């Protein structure tokens, strides 16, 4: 994570610390793995503290069946661990076990302005014409996200492009709080948004993002798919009739071909040019089995490990509870100092 090392001047006085959150909303796929889980794992052990949170409080801004929410929270935790996240190195926990997030979010609800929230693209997309019927939580969502980050004085936030606006809002909330109370208390965190290979596209349409909400299961590789299912989906993936080019430029205007090459490169840990140096000139009938082998090789240990972990949910729960306890050691004193700044009396 090279971007993560640069620190904005205004947060220079803060120890670099990475925080990211992901919603336990089910159906982890290759896009989540390459775009989020793998990046979070790669950021581990690079000298910064890392905190990764399953944001169950955010999930209930739209209706969640309680049993499904519990299952999805554990499955996401299993996905993190199976992907290589080490709970001894990173703090892995679900948001509701660290009440300081919600406590700071209330204060931020009183700092953020209605107009700021009204401008959020995700709010406009999700609420759409139904704003009157949306939960108040969905509107306040970005203020809770700001609290997630700032309750740890986190400085770096790895996210997808779609979350950039929320991290910018987090900076606005931090700046207004600091200004209103005349303090330099909260850092202005940086979004860390990485390269093109982390935008994994649908296997059925290279112009659409791979997504859990796509009705076609063939459009995505789920982390729970077995080797046969993975190989079959890749065999059927949409391509064009041309052979593979020898350099990246040759993938322009070929979204399906580019997607498969990007996936190969990301899984192999190579650059697109390195991959094309090896496979340039080959037909997809030759390249697809190579990609299928590589995908099975990298993903099937993850799905095997996930099912092993899911067979012992109480162990997952214990890991989350331990992660939450460590996270609270950072969060609690920051909340106390915030309360003092705001003028809340405490004994
Ligand atoms: P979501 O599944 O939209 O809740 O996203 C969870 C995480 O996975 C976020 O960090 C996203 O940026 C990432 N993500 C989701 N879909 C993709 C995709 N197709 N390619 C890359 N990253 C993705
Ligand atoms: N809003 C993020 C998403 O939908 C999830 C999230 C919640 C988050 N809190 C966060 C991401 C804090 C980064 C930091 O993907």
Image (tube, rainbow, N blue to C red):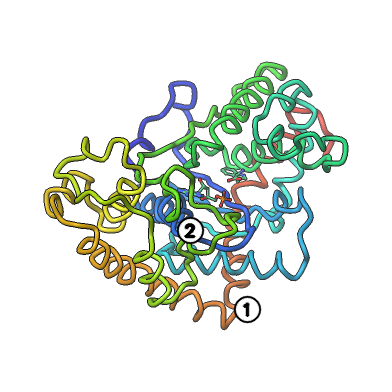
Q: Does the residue labelled 2 lie within 8 Å of ligand 1?
A: no
* Residue drawn at point x = 65 percent, y = 30 percent: 121
Q: Residue 145 carries which label?
A: none
**Quadrant of residue 334 within the rendered picture:** top right
Apparent side of residue 170 relative to residue 203 in the rendered image (left or right):
right
Q: Earlier in the sequence, mark 2 or mark 1?
A: 2
**Foreground residue among 326 and 30:** 30
- Work out whether residue 347 can be spotted: no
111 and 204: which is toward the camera: 204
Say which quadrant the N terminus sits in: top left
The residue that disc 1 covers is: 314
Q: Can residue 218 be seen in this snapshot?
A: yes
Q: What residue lies at 77% left-to-right and 36% top-to-bottom?
A: 139
Q: Quadrant of residue 103?
A: top right
Say if 188 sits above or below 87 in the image: above
- For this view, does 40 lie left or right of residue 76? left
Q: Residue 219 carries which label?
A: 2
Q: Is residue 234 above or below residue 344?
A: below
């Amino acid at each position: 994570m090279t971007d993560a090392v640069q620190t904005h001047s205004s947060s220079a006085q803060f120890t670099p610390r990475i925080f990211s959150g992901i919603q336990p909303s089910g159906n982890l796929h290759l896009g989540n793995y390459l775009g989020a889980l793998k990046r979070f794992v790669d950021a581990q052990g690079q000298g910064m503290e890392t905190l990764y949170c399953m944001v169950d409080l955010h999930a209930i801004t739209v209706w969640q069946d309680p049993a499904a929410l519990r299952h999805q929270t554990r499955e996401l935790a299993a996905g993190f661990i199976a992907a290589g996240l080490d709970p001894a190195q990173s703090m892995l926990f679900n948001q509701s076990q660290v009440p300081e997030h919600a406590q700071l979010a209330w204060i931020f609800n009183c700092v953020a302005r209605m107009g700021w929230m009204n401008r959020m693209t995700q709010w406009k997309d999700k609420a759409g014409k139904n704003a009157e019927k949306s939960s108040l939580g969905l509107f306040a969502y970005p203020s809770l996200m700001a609290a997630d980050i700032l309750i740890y004085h986190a400085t770096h936030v790895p996210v997808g492009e779609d979350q950039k606006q929320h991290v910018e809002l987090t900076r606005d909330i931090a700046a207004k709080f600091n200004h209103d109370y005349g303090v330099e208390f909260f850092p202005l965190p940086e979004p860390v948004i990485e390269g093109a290979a982390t935008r994994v596209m649908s296997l059925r349409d290279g112009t659409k993002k791979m997504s859990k909400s796509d009705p076609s299961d063939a459009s995505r590789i789920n982390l729970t798919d077995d080797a046969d299912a993975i190989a079959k989906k890749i065999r059927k993936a949409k391509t064009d009739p041309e052979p593979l080019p020898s350099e990246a430029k040759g993938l322009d205007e070929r979204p399906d071909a580019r997607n498969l090459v990007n996936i190969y490169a990301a899984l192999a840990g190579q650059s697109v040019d390195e991959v094309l140096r090896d496979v340039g000139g080959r037909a997809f009938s030759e390249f697809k089995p190579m990609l299928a082998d590589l995908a099975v090789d990298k993903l099937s240990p993850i799905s095997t490990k996930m099912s092993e972990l899911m067979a012992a949910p109480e162990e997952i729960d214990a890991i989350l509870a331990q992660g939450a306890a460590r996270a609270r050691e950072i969060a609690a004193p920051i909340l106390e100092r915030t309360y003092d700044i705001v003028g809340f009396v405490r004994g």
